[in-house]
Amino acid sequence: MSAAVQPSMAEVLRPLRNATHALHEALDSQLPIAREDASLADYADHLRALRPWLEAVRQALAVPGDPGLDRVARRTDRRLAALALDLEDAGAAPVGEHAAATAQACLAPRLVEAAAEPAFAWGLAYVLEGSQLGGLAMHKRLAPKLAPHPMRYFQPVDAPDGLPAHWKEFVAQLAAALRDPAAVDSAQRGAVAGFETLIPRFGLQPAGL
């Protein structure tokens, strides 16, 4: 009996990309940090807006008890640590604990309740891990302008063989988790939820995009 043909990266990612394309494009095109004149203050504002969302997603990833998702959650812990150091180096006031807790409390129910489905959580992980690719491009563009700030958050986390190799490994794990149409549908809902809870953090509106 011949071995099953493994799907390509494009085939694995296509359903998630199709489900989130409009949201992803709208977010990328409107982020202040993506402007040509983005400043260190814009970077600090970006990190402050991200922090409650990252914490809520990290909490959601831990719910299913899946080893692969747990690894993404641990990487998220390290990204949160880099975020805190970057805010400190920027001389920016950290997110107020009460404000951060309130924001996370608003985000968490939708993400954590639904993330009891592992495939939904893999959809969230797709948004989170994919953001590292955008972050690396952002670092290359902004690092010379914002030097000597290290911009740790936009640098890859736990990718000793490089981000492309890390992404390929993640997609292979994603393919193993999404083996049937029901799982793919759940992951699509998770990815959409990831974007729809992230976009308002920057004062943008996901509705009507």
Image (tube, grey):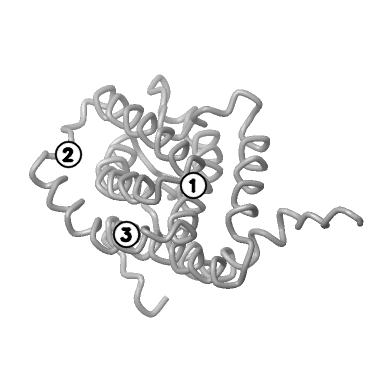
Q: Amino acid at mark 3?
A: Leu
- CA–CA distance between discs 1 and 2? 21 Å
- Percent position (x, y) of residue 209? 42, 75
**For this view, does 151 lie left or right of residue 112?**
right
Q: Earlier in the sequence, mark 3 or mark 2?
A: 2
Mark 1 to mark 3: distance in Å?
Answer: 18 Å
Dot 2 amino acid type: Val
Q: Position of residue 129 (x, y in %)?
A: 50, 45
User: Which of marks 3 and 1 precedes in the sequence?
Assistant: 3
Local packing at callout 3 (Cα closer than 10 Å; few below 14, some 14-19, many 20+) is many
Query: Which residue is labeled 2 in the image?
Result: 95
User: Going 46% across and 40% down the picture, which residue do you hit?
Assistant: 72
- Closer to the camera: disc 1 or disc 3? 3
Viewer-proximal residue among 99 and 140: 99
97 or 189, which is in the foreground? 189
The residue identified by callout 1 is 131
* Left or right: where 57 falls relative to 184: left
Left or right: where 47 falls relative to 98? right
